[in-house]
């Protein structure tokens, strides 16, 4: 095994071009487990820890450009206002020690259906900034990033430089089912974001299909129902029948398996429950914000 | 490969390190510092917790090569680390713990039960006084994590303590005495100010 320690992003891209089989290591919270248990013996480890810009973020007009190695702890501490869904999801990852090392770049690299960043990124709207020495930068829409179980759209010579996550324009929630609060890989998880500016709702489902997925039929149904009932303007409580149908469509978007963490039917059921709850929570806070701004006006 | 990094305030060098080796392995097997425990090697138990550039991490999940040039504090250096922090910084340049001292570190003193007369950090003393140590396997990780909590947050609520220690498993105590120990250390810390 060789340990490559590029001192700059350019050097890292050059190393990845020269050794496409090199395994990048950021926080190491996925890679080291595999090495410790001899599940993986890469020829090259490509250490990204010396590349300072990977741990930085920039808050732009529309989105946050989140460096691939920004640890979850920093997201929770610094980006709760801009990226509330991702901050909530980050807080559910493992433990403080793991959150101090692991980040979204590694979560995307592993592309586990259970990764907690994914539902939040799908719901918020995001693009993955991938770069290679040969072809430069490309932005991969998050909906096209997950290509199979633990597979993603990266080419062998590419590295993730950053993720561009849309800044929240409305309430967001993240919900996860597990046996306790800490150190739990999701049995299933659900992210929801209201986007009042475009009058749309987006979702993300974790651990209930071969890849993280959006519940698109549920989104379309809810978008239409909210529009029809004038809900965005009148700020009324969402009718129980609408919430119920939304929940059912979210369950229907799942394609889960039975495994040690839970059965397929439990996952389908639990996703529906989380969908209804997160819709209620986010809608309540949307109504609260509306009332507050009307009161002030 | 060779890795140079600071351990408990002193520069150290590890030779013949395998590229896939963890920081935990280097500390325990190459530097003779078995304080950080190896229980799971997968980040689940926290018994290998050390400070990496001040940040608590599982040393079993840090590749040795990643610590080149960086700063590691282990439980063996915790007493000195806490002392220097209390005296605010290292003015003399002779701070830190030598590898030999760290290797020989024991909760010695005149009484091994109470730690009396030994060189203990306040959190270590509090763990002894509160009866938070049974088999002791989880203790080093909990000490490092608790000490960092109290550095960051001198008056933690119970919820803060639970959150800070949520990455550390203990199979013996049932955690209540550990909670007591952290509360005790916090109370003593605020009395001292
Ligand atoms: C005890 C424990 C509990 C966990 N609990 C959770 C949990 O609750 N939720 C959850 O989502 N995850 C969990 N994980 C998994 C892990 O912590 C996350 O997936 C984390 O986001 C990985 O980030 P990292 O920086 O440590 O990745 P690494 O281990 O460094 O890398 C992971 C993968 O991504 C690749 N990679 C890293 N950076 C880049 C880059 N810039 N460009 C291209 N590829 C890259 C690596 O080659 C590797 O394939 C847990 C892990 C452990 C050990
Ligand atoms: S040995 Fe590192 S967390 Fe268990
Ligand atoms: S005292 Fe035995 S594991 Fe904690």
Image (cartoon, rainbow, N blue to C red):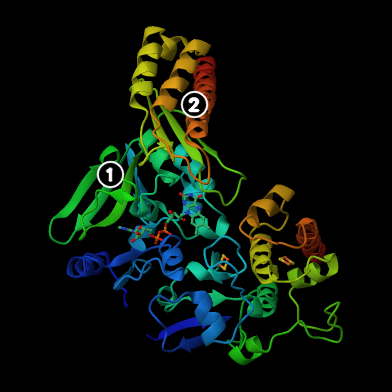
Residue A125: image location, x then y, percent: 33, 35
In the drawing, does residue A97 fall left or right of residue A123? right
Residue that numbered label 2 is attached to: A272
Residue plotted at (65% across, 90% down) = B101
Chain of the residue under the numbered disc 2 shown in the image: A
Whether residue A24 is situated above or below residue B27 in the rendered picture = above
Q: Is residue A166 left or right of residue A98?
A: left
Residue at point 64% right, 60% down? Answer: B168
Which residue occupies 61% across, 45% down?
A181
Asked if labels 1 and 2 touch by Cβ distance under 8 angstroms, the answer is: no
What separation in Å lies between label 2 and label 1 (alpha carbons)?
25 Å
Asked whether the viewer can see residue B53, the reply is: no
Disc 1 packing (10 Å; few <14; some 14–19; many ≥20): some
The quarter of the image holding the N terminus of chain A is: bottom left
| Front residue of A190 and A130 | A190
Q: In the rendered image, which residue does mark 1 sit on?
A: A145
- In the picture as drawn, the residue positioned furthest to the left comes out as A134
Q: Is residue B117 visible?
A: yes
Q: Nearer the viewer, mark 2 or mark 1?
A: 2
Single out the residue that lies furthest toward the bottom: B100
The image position of residue B100, as x and y in percent, is 62, 92
**To which quarter of the image does residue B123 belong?**
bottom right
x then y, percent, for residue A266: 52, 33
Label 2 environment density (alpha carbons within 10 Å; few <14, some 14–19, many ≥20): many
């Amino acid at each position: 095994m060789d340990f490559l320690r590029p001192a700059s992003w350019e050097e890292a891209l050059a190393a990845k071009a020269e050794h496409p089989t090199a395994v990048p290591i950021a926080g190491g919270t996925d890679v080291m487990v595999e090495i410790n248990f001899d599940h993986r013996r890469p020829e090259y480890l490509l250490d990204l820890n010396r590349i300072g810009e990977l741990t930085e973020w920039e808050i732009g007009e529309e989105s946050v450009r989140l460096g691939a190695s920004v640890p979850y702890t920093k997201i929770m501490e610094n980006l709760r206002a801009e990226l509330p869904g991702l901050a909530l999801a980050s807080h559910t990852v493992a433990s403080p020690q793991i959150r101090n090392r692991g980040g979204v770049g590694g979560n995307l690299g592993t592309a586990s259906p259970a990764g907690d960043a994914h539902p939040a990124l799908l719901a918020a709207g995001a693009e993955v900034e991938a770069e290679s020495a040969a072809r430069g930068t490309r932005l991969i829409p998050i909906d096209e990033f997950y290509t199979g179980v633990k597979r993603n759209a990266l080419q062998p010579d590419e590295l993730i430089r950053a993720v561009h996550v849309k800044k929240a324009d409305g309430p967001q929630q993240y919900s996860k089912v597990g046996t306790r609060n800490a150190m739990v890989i999701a049995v299933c998880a659900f992210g929801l974001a209201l986007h009042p500016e475009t009058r749309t709702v987006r979702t993300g489902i974790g651990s209930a299909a071969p890849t993280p997925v959006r519940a698109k039929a549920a989104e379309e149904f809810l978008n239409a129902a909210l529009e029809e009932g004038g809900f965005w303007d009148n700020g009324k409580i969402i009718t129980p029948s609408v919430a119920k149908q939304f929940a059912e469509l979210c369950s229907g978007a799942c394609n889960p398996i039975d495994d040690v963490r839970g059965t397929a039917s439990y996952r389908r059921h639990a996703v529906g429950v989380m969908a209804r709850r997160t819709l209620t929570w986010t809608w309540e806070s949307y109504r609260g914000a509306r009332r507050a701004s009307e009161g002030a006006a | 490969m060779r890795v140079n990094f600071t351990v408990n305030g002193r520069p150290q060098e590890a030779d013949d390190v395998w590229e896939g080796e963890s920081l935990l392995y280097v500390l325990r097997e190459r530097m003779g510092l078995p304080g950080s425990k190896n229980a799971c090697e997968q980040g689940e138990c926290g018994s290998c917790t050390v400070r990496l550039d001040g940040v608590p991490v599982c040393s079993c999940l840090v590749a040795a090569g990643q610590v080149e040039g960086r700063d590691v504090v282990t439980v063996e250096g915790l007493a000195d680390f806490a002392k220097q922090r209390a005296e605010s910084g290292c003015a003399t340049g002779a701070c830190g713990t030598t590898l030999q001292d760290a290797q020989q570190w024991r909760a010695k003193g005149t009484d091994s039960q109470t730690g009396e007369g030994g060189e203990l950090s306040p959190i270590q003393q509090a763990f002894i006084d509160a009866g938070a140590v049974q088999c002791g396997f989880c203790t080093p990780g909990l000490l490092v994590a608790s000490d960092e909590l109290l550095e960051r947050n001198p008056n933690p609520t119970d919820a803060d303590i639970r959150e800070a220690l949520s990455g550390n498993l203990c199979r013996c105590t049932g955690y209540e005495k550990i909670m007591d120990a952290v509360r005790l250390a916090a109370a003593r810390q605020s009395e001292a100010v």
